[in-house]
């Protein structure tokens, strides 16, 4: 039986059901101190005075540190993947409510937490800006000067820019917009907005730094161990080989744990006190750490004879107080803003801005769900206005393989058409729907989207075969629940013709596993999968060389153990296979965004939703959610399906309930009591499907799937609501109150303010 | 803050005598004792990751003072395979692929054990109701539903838990 394509139970299944799987959350080390963070209560202000003397004197407090203490050790203690803008602890200014300002260390975390109350901070309040559109033009400047990290070539031109909140202004131009709109029979323009939400993995971020004689080990809940090592080494001015980053399993990630989060703080504290230091967040603190961009998207389309011939997109991304990976979201995702449609004339302006909100970064879909929300609501409105069926309109305009995307890259191995067809079939779209006539109305909607993958990028892997024939894979891909250990082991097993369960995976250890850009953007199955396949093939070739050396004719069925004994005279030695994968990539032209090869592969996904709306309360009930994805050939169909339904349910939360509520920059619902994520009672009938497709450049035809099911959920639900009650929602989350007000307004009996 | 109390309890069937600080919660005490299956996540008793069975009742370990288990029977997920074999519920969770990151899994499994002890053949609504206090951010809910039903079938077999393996 082929190992690739088999629904192997997760290799770590037993550890997980018995409660014995390792997480940094569980880790404790002898002599370890706990750090608790004192946070800013102001959205924007100068630090005038910071008095920690009382806190220092509290029984059980080991030490208290501020940003100035860190500056003595690291003169420029600023980190970040896109910009070096985030200080380890605030320096000179605070930029959002919840920003780390000081830290208390104690052996007992409760004592450290209590001592935070004794810290006294005085700020000079500065005007703050919170809205992404306003921030792009505001006189209120969050950071005086832009400091690109230099990691990404496409951000270098921003170096030294002053007095602006714009962290990236990405442009794409294709065709002639004026001509396109002039030639259109109809022009449609809408504005859509999305709210700020966050990942809330159930394991909050945790990092433990352990100082050695001339080295530092960091156990951390990161999705990007290689990046953490590089960044910590840079901050300390050390060679990378003195920093070791180790990652057990993650209790969820979803993009919250990419790049540096707590690692720099843990590292510098451990070096200052010469003891292991653990920094672990509470659930509340996740709300002050990283989030998903709120957006405003103005979209305008020109249509002629039922074909979209021109589309202009203006997207504003609310990046919050630190850039994190936000500028890359604006660019890498921005270029898909016109959607999975074949449009001759396209312009995209994608602008990311600093504001005084908690930082925004990568969250499952890297900005694509915000874009699909707008362009698929817009598409539905156009079809409705033209009196064309929503499915038929999409079919007429869909971007098919062999046709150029707005970037100029020709589409290949992207089964958007199949995704759309399968949604329509599962929804039984051609059959009439009983929409009801009483208090409760029903409706249905569909939506599709695409996402590009990441490039330039690198993944490396090592396959080690021991003299007893047992196999270990070393990889820095992190298993945060998506099942990467199992999938990678399956690829090794497929190449080496062994059972998957016999392959052991050592993941997340920069001392032994090669560089990997990160477990993010649904890139691991494709990028690391290709590297792992190459490493396994390399090992297989080396085994064959051993066999030839032993004088066995080519093609002989040999016992691996026998080979080692022949070569080394006893059970000794190793065969080490290595693999590196770097996909081809052509950087886009900075002025037009055009590129002949903008992504190693495309993800295509969509959803169909059936909803019920209570016209007396505005309550929406999703009855059925159909999610279809192009994942190439799935490595592990069972796990792949769970990724699809899991992604869709997460997006369901972002559609109907999740919302970071702010009052003057302060999040007012930073807990599960007030920030509602989906629970068992919120789950509709779920249908998940992977279309029959192949990614020719992927390992055995596979590609990523972690984000694909998030694309269509929100607009499919909004389109279904429109179908049910004739009301168009343009802002997320979809709240009963807003819907009820809109319905009553449409009926000519608006609700008063007090109602 | 650092008042310490000596307590005695039956932990996973074994008599334990330990000293705890009065401000520690049950999860922290279990971690001190080397049991990590119960985890604090939301810190408000809303997510179920910290589920522990105290005298036969599921409690939120993050809200339960450690000293309050003095004289009580405490059972954690680690007890389920004490004989070296997975329980039918654990096996059903594996067979159904009912988890991803695994952080919430012990809580779901303990609640499912409780559910099936009280209602050996629950319908979907009863399952949703019983597990509505457990959150799974990876959202493996459809698979958890399958797992609970499978576990009920495995437990109903006359051969009992052996049939799960």
Image: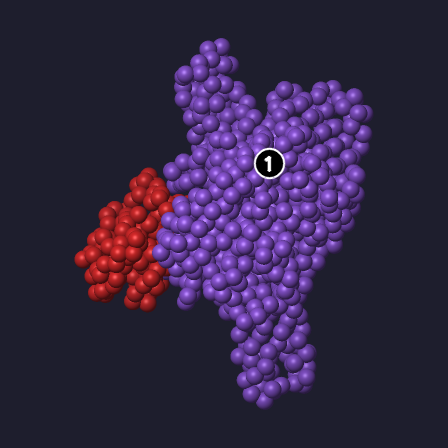
Host chain of mark 1? A
Task: Check the image and report above or below for A316 versus A64.
Answer: above
Q: Residue A365: x and y, percent? A: 58, 43
- Name which residue lies at 53% across and 48% down: A256
Task: Check the image and report above or below for A518 versus A329.
Answer: below
Horizontal side of residue B164 vs A577, given as left or right: left
- Name which residue lies at 32% across and 40% down: B129
- Name which residue lies at 64% across and 71% down: A577
Image chain in purple: A
Q: Nearer the viewer, residue A677 or A699?
A: A677
Q: Is residue A260 visible?
A: yes
Task: Give the farthest residue toward the bottom.
Answer: A569
Task: Check the image and report above or below for A289 versus A19.
Answer: above
Task: Check the image and report above or below for A728 versus A410.
Answer: above
Image chain in red: B
Q: Is residue A526 visible?
A: no
Image quarter in which the C terminus of chain A is found: top left
Local secondary structure at mark 1: loop
Mark 1 burial class by Cα count in 10 Å: few <14, some 14-19, many 20+: many
């Amino acid at each position: 039986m082929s190992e690739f394509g088999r629904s192997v139970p997760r290799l770590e299944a037993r550890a997980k059901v018995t409660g014995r799987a390792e997480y940094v959350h569980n880790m404790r080390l002898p002599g370890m101190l706990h750090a608790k963070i004192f946070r800013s209560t102001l959205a924007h202000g100068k630090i005038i005075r910071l008095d920690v003397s009382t806190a220092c004197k509290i029984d059980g407090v080991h030490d208290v540190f501020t940003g100035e203490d860190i500056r003595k050790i690291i003169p420029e203690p600023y980190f970040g993947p896109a910009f070096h803008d985030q200080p380890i602890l605030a320096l000179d200014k605070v930029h959002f409510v919840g920003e780390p300002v000081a830290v208390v260390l104690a052996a007992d975390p409760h004592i450290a937490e209590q001592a935070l109350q004794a810290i006294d901070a005085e700020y000079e309040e500065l005007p703050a800006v919170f809205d992404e559109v306003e921030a792009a033009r505001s006189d209120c400047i969050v950071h005086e000067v832009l400091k690109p990290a230099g990691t990404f070539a496409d951000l270098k031109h921003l170096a030294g820019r002053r007095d602006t909140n714009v962290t990236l202004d990405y442009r794409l131009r294709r065709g002639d917009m004026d001509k396109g709109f002039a030639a259109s029979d109809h022009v449609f323009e809408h504005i859509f907005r999305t709210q700020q939400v966050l990942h809330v993995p159930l394991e909050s971020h945790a990092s433990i730094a352990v100082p050695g004689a001339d080295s530092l080990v960091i156990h951390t809940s990161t999705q990007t161990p290689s990046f953490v090592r590089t960044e910590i080494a840079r901050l300390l001015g050390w060679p990378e080989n003195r920093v070791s980053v180790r990652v057990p399993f993650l209790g969820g990630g979803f993009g919250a744990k990419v790049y540096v989060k707590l690692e720099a703080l843990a590292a510098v504290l451990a070096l200052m006190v010469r003891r292991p230091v653990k920094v672990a967040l509470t659930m509340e603190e996740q709300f002050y750490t990283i989030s998903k961009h709120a957006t405003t998207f103005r979209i305008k389309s020109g249509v002629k004879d039922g074909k979209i011939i021109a589309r202009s997109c203006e997207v504003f991304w609310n990046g919050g107080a630190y850039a994190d990976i936000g500028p890359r979201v604006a660019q890498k995702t921005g270029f898909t803003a016109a959607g999975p449609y074949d449009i001759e004339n396209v312009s995209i302006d994608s602008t990311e801005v600093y504001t005084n909100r908690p930082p925004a970064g990568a969250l499952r879909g890297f900005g694509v769900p915000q874009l699909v929300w707008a362009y698929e609501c817009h598409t539905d409105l156009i079809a409705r206005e033209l009196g064309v069926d929503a499915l038929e309109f999409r079919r007429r305009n869909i971007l098919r393989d062999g046709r150029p995307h707005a970037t100029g890259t020709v589409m290949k191995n992207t089964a958007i058409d199949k995704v759309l067809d399968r949604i329509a079939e599962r929804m039984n779209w051609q059959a009439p729907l009983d929409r009801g006539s009483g208090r409760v109305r029903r409706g249905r909607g569909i939506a599709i989207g695409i996402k590009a993958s990441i490039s330039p990028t690198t993944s490396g892997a090592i396959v080690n075969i021991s003299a007893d024939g047992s196999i270990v894979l070393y990889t820095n891909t992190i298993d945060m629940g998506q099942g990467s250990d199992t999938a990678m082991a399956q690829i090794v097993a497929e190449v080496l013709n062994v059972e998957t369960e016999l392959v052991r995976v050592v993941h997340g250890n920069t001392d032994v596993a090669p560089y990997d850009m990160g477990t993010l953007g649904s890139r691991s199955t494709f990028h690391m999968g290709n590297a792992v396949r190459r490493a396994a093939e390399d090992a297989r070739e080396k085994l064959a060389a051993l066999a030839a050396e032993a004088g066995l004719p080519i093609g002989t069925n040999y016992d691996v153990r026998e080979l080692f004994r022949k070569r080394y005279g006893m059970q000794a030695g190793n065969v080490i296979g290595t693999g590196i994968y770097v996909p081809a990539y052509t950087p886009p032209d900075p002025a037009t965004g055009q590129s002949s090869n903008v992504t190693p592969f495309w993800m295509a996904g969509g959803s169909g939703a059936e909803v019920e709306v209570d016209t007396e309360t505005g309550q929406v009930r999703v009855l059925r959610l159909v999610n279809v994805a192009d994942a190439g050939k799935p490595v592990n169909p069972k796990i792949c399906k769970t990724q699809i339904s899991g992604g869709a349910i997460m997006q369901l939360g972002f559609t109907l309930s999740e919302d970071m509520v702010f009052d003057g920059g302060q999040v007012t619902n930073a807990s599960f009591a007030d920030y509602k994520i989906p629970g068992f009672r919120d789950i509709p009938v779920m249908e998940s499907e992977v279309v029959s497709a192949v990614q020719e450049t992927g390992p055995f035809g596979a590609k990523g799937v972690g984000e694909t099911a998030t694309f269509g959920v929100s607009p499919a639900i909004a389109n279904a609501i429109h179908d049910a009650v004739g009301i168009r929602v343009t802002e997320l989350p979809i709240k009963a109150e807003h819907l009820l007000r809109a319905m009553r307004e449409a009926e000519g009996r608006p609700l008063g303010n007090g109602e | 803050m650092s008042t310490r109390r000596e307590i005695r309890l039956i932990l996973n069937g074994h008599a334990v005598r330990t000293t705890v600080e009065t401000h520690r919660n049950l999860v922290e005490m279990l971690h001190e004792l080397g049991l990590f299956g119960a985890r604090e996540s939301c810190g408000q008793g809303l997510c179920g990751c910290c589920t522990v069975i105290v005298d036969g009742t599921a409690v939120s370990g993050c809200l339960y003072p450690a000293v309050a288990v003095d004289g009580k029977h405490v059972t954690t997920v680690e007890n389920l395979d004490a004989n070296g074999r997975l329980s039918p519920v654990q096996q059903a969770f594996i067979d159904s692929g009912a988890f991803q990151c695994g952080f919430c899994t012990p809580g779901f499994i303990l609640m499912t054990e409780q559910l099936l002890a009280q209602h050996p053949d629950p319908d979907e609504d009863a399952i949703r109701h019983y597990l509505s206090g457990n959150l799974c951010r990876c959202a493996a809910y459809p698979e958890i539903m399958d797992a609970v039903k499978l576990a009920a079938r495995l437990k109903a077999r006359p051969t009992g838990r052996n049939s799960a393996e």
